[in-house]
Amino acid sequence: MKRIAKYSLIAVAFSALSAVGFAQVAEIGVHAGASRISNPEIGVLSSGGVDFPVELDDGWRIGFRLTLNNWRFFGNEFGYAYNRTQLKIGGEGDGMAIHQGFYNFLAYALPEGSVIRPFATVGVHFSNFAPPGSSAASGGGDNKFGFNYGGGLKVRISPLFLLRFDVRQYQNGKPFDLPSADGLLRQTEISAGFSLAL
């Protein structure tokens, strides 16, 4: 009788651990996609009495995200993205980088364990605008803080892997504090990614 009770207890413990093993407690993944800039005029530069408009152009992005699904319908996410854009002065462009770090709160439409999980998100971020010839690693660039919001869809393709699709808008002040800059810079992310569920 003691032996049956012992094996029953082991079986229950094993079943409980198996259930926990398939829960998406955390996800780590990569994403890539487009970076669309609206309200791209960031000011003017003057030379010889002539004003040259300065603006940012659309580009691409790549990055990673770490998501902690602390509750059945809610989660927290931390991440980094490298954006490549063009700094245009008087219509002439040169490549530059935008480095972003962000924290987001996620609210899911379906509970933990669902194969398909639509979500909405809101968060805060910083963007480091590194103009041509400078590097964020050596302290170059201009930091701006802002907020972001959006939504997406996660699709589990196996117990360990999932695909995700995101659309987000990042809003922050315009970089470099140039004359005639007004309003917020708005950057829209359209991306797809691949994640490992831990």
Image: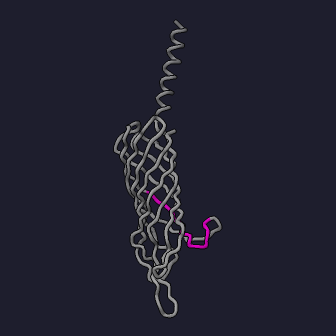
- State the residue in front, 61 or 22: 61
Q: Quadrant of residue 111?
A: top left
Residue 39: percent from left, percent from top: 39, 72
The residue sitting at 42% across, 73% down in the picture is: 40
Residue 118: percent from left, percent from top: 36, 46
Farthest residue, direction left: 109
Q: Is 181 placed above or below 1 here? A: below
Q: Quadrant of residue 148?
A: bottom left
The residue sitting at 48% across, 26% down in the picture is: 16
The residue sitting at 44% across, 36% down in the picture is: 158
Q: Is 137 placed above or below 4 here? A: below
Q: Is 29 placed above or below 33 here? A: above
- State the residue in front, 143 or 136: 136
Residue 42: percent from left, percent from top: 45, 77
- State the residue in front, 119 or 82: 82
Q: Is residue 47 magenta?
A: no
Residue 190: percent from left, percent from top: 41, 57
- State the residue in front, 140 or 95: 95
Q: Is residue 132 magenta?
A: yes
How many marks on residues?
0
Taking 153 as reference, is 101 left or right? right
> In the image, which residues are magenta?
123-136
The residue sitting at 53% across, 13% down in the picture is: 7
Farthest residue, direction bottom: 49
